[in-house]
Amino acid sequence: MNRINHAGALLLALYLPFATSECLAGAAAVGVPLNTPAMRAPAAQNGVLIDLARAGTRLVAVGERGLILLSDDNGQSWRQASVPVSVSLTAVRFVDAQKGWAVGHAGVVLATLDGGEHWTLQLDGVRVAQLELDAAKADQATAADPDAALIRVQNAERLVADGPDKPFLALEFVDARRGLIVGAYGLALLTTDGGATWQSLMGRIANPNGLHLYAISRQGTHWFLAGEQGYLARSDDDAVSFSQLDSPYEGSFFTLQNRADGALVVAGLKGNAFVSHDAGASFQRLSVPVPISFNDATRLADGQLLLVNQGGTLFRNSEQTGAALLPLGKPLGKPVSSVIEAADGSLIVAGFTGLQRLAQPATAASE
């Protein structure tokens, strides 16, 4: 749907500062990348990488133009995987050492059964739009608010007319069968069979303005969503439906993560970060020393939460640190889009200049 205005495009760029023009492209522009396998790239580890995941002890990185890299030595060396599309990939998750999914621009959903060695295309933006249109028409007949139902159908029709130009931005899987993916304009789809089929959840999420959804987190049957303009939502029925939460901030949130003690941390634009101890009913501001936007967060093996901002500074937070975000090591001096802990305790960061391995979190000295 070609209605991303300058503000919306800026927000997407802030979350994915290294995004290509595919994010704003029309159906004709994304048609070729959807049908073109990712090219082999020399020194691919220095390319634009956007997200990181663990597949057992293996590390998996995804990025622009269908780039997927694998490491079996804790990030010391990387090799490129076989990928059937060349659109930018924005997020990746694994439920075990073999089964994983990646999402990205043009409504792409990829799946792997061999730890990321090979990927198959499960979904694209054309089918995503049609799924929402079918769901909107099915719900229209029994809708309590006929006007709202009609608007939803009309919006879905525009999605179909615009073609596969909508990016997915986050995903979360409970196991090898049940998963949720979300993205621009409030796109949200659920699978209960490992991606063989998908159903649109847009009609079950309280997001009347179609705000972009950037992050997902889960605590048992409670699911949380975060997005632009301070959007926060919670599901109390295992992702069947979502209600909007009162937000402590009007700027965009780009990451959600649960601490070891069950607290929910949300962070985003201009270094704004908050913690909730009551499943999103209320939030307390976290003390941040620099007003630079947060891009990602991960929970370390020792239970600490690690956040990274666009300036490449790492911050840790835990029940012991309370409302403070404490810097970890020296700033990397470059934008970072994602961070993850390797099996040996080292840290891997991804960003505009590729992948970098850091020493143990205690010192985070660059190797």
Image: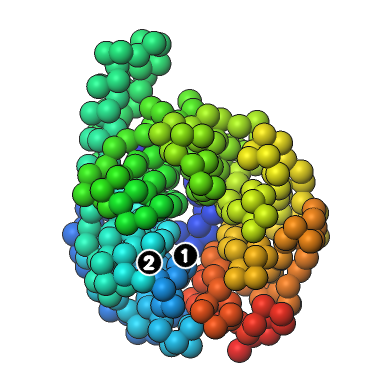
Cβ–Cβ below 8 Å for labels 1 and 2?
A: no
In this figure, which residue is indicated by the disc labeled 1? 51
Residue 42 - label: none
Q: Give how far across and how far down residue 46 sits, in percent.
A: 46, 80
- Disc nearest the viewer among 1 and 2: 2
Give left or right: position of 172 versus 316. left
In this figure, which residue is indicated by the disc labeled 2? 96
Q: Secondary structure at mark 2?
A: loop
Mark 2 or mark 1, which is nearer the start of the sequence?
1
Residue at 56% in and 68% down: 339
Q: Give how far across and how far down residue 28 sits, in percent.
A: 23, 48
Q: Residues within 10 Å of mark 2 (few under 14, many from 20)?
A: some
Relative to residue 94, is residue 3 depicted above or below? above
Q: Residues within 10 Å of mark 1 (few under 14, many from 20)?
A: many
Alpha carbon distance from label 1 to label 2: 17 Å
Q: Which residue is most to the left?
A: 35
Residue 107, visible in the rendered structure: yes
Q: Amino acid at mark 1?
A: Asp
Residue 125, visible in the rendered structure: no
